[in-house]
Amino acid sequence: MNDITTQDDRQGVIVAHLGVAVEVRFDAGGKNEIIRVKRNSGHVVGDKVTVKGEILTRLERKSVLNRMDARGVKHTVGANLDTLCIVVACEPMPPPGFIDRAIVAARTARLRPILLINKCDLPASKEYEEQIYETYTNSVPLYTLSAETGDGLDRLTDYLSQGLRGIFVGPTGVGKSSLINSLCPAINLQTRPLNESKKRGRHTTTVSTLHSLRDGGELIDSPGFIDFGLVNISVLDLAFHFPGFEKALEKHCSFRDCLHRSEPGCVVTELIAQQKISQERYAIYAGILHELEELRTELRYREKNKRRKK
C-alpha cells in the first residue's frame, strides 16, 4: 500500500469492523466516523488508513496476525500489533494445542506472545496454573490475574503502557471482555456467564474493537474462537518456534532443516529420550506438524488443478 498522503487526506486507525463498515479514529482528533466498505474489503482493526471523502485507503502494515478456522478459511485477526495476549482460564479450558498454535503464530509474525491466566480467584485455578507454569514458564511471560478481583492487572498494565498495541485472543468464556472492562472501566463491554451445564462460554464479543488504555498502550478485543489454525507458516517455522524446544535448539541439530522426527543428530529427540521433553508435548508438536504437511499437500493439489483448468 502507498504511504503517500496529501493535505486533503485524513489519517487514522480502524478501531472497529462492523461487517459492511468500519469505524475510524483520526490522528488529528475529533469525532470517530463510520466509513462504508465492501464486506470482503480486507480491512481489519488496527489498520492505518487515510480517508478522502468516502474513499478509504489502507496504509502499509508493520505486522499482521492470521489464523485459519476449522473450515480452512483464513481470517486476519489484527494489524500493526506488537504483542499477542493469549487469554486462558481453568473454566473453560482451551483445546489441546491452542496455546502452542497461538505462540507459533505470534513468533512467526514477529509479535511477542504473552500468556494471561485469568480467573485466578476460582478454586480450580491453582492446579491449572501449576500445569501452565510447568509447561510454558521458560517459553513466554506468564501473568496470573483476575478480572473479577483485579489481582495481577497492575503488572499487565505496566507492560502494555510501554506504548504497545496488543490483542486478546482465546476461547469464548475465558474473560477477555471482562479483562478489558477492568483495564478500561469506561468501556463497559457486554459480558455473559458460562453455560454451566457445558462449561462453555457464550459469545458476547461479535466484532473486533480497539481500545486505548488510560496509562498508555492499546488493546484489541476479538471474538472468541477455539481453532487457531496456522496460516502461511512452514514446517520449519513450527520446528523453530514451538514452545518448549527453545533450550534444545540452542544446541543446534545436525541438520538446519531438521523437523525433529528421527533425523540423525536431532537434539529434540535426544532430550525426549532423556525425558527432558515430555512425550505429551512432543505429541502436540507432531500433530501440528502433520496438519501443516497435509495443508501443504492440499494447497499444491489446488494449485495444480488451477493450472490444468487454464
Image (cartoon, rainbow, N blue to C red):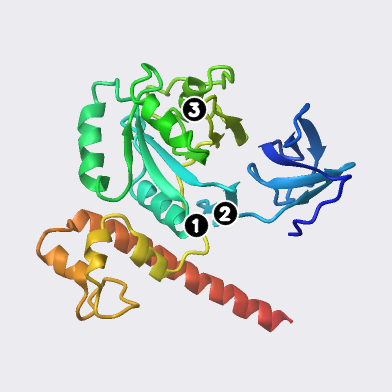
Kind of residue indicated by mark 3 = Arg
Question: Which labelled disc corresponds to residue 109?
Answer: 1
Kind of residue indicated by mark 2 = Ser
- Number of numbered labels in the structure image: 3
Quarter of the image with the N terminus is: bottom right
User: Which type of secondary structure does the marked residue at label 2 adopt?
Assistant: loop
Residue at 88% across / 42% down in the picture? 54
Upstream in the sequence, badge 1 or badge 3? Answer: 1
Please provide percent x and percent y for residue 248. Answer: 22, 64
Disc 1: CA contacts within 10 A as few (<14), some (14-19) or many (>=20): many
Give above or below for 185 relative to 305: above
Q: Which residue is mark 3?
A: 202
Q: Is residue 198 visible?
A: no
Please provide percent x and percent y for residue 189. Answer: 57, 22
Upstream in the sequence, badge 2 or badge 3? Answer: 2
Q: Is residue 65 visible?
A: yes
Q: Which residue is mark 2?
A: 63
Give above or below for 193 relative to 106: above
Label 2 – label 3 distance at C-alpha = 30 Å
Residue at 25% across / 75% down in the picture? 253
Q: Residue 306 lies in what quarter of the image?
A: bottom right
Residue 30 falls left or right of residue 108: right
Please provide percent x and percent y for residue 261. Answer: 26, 72
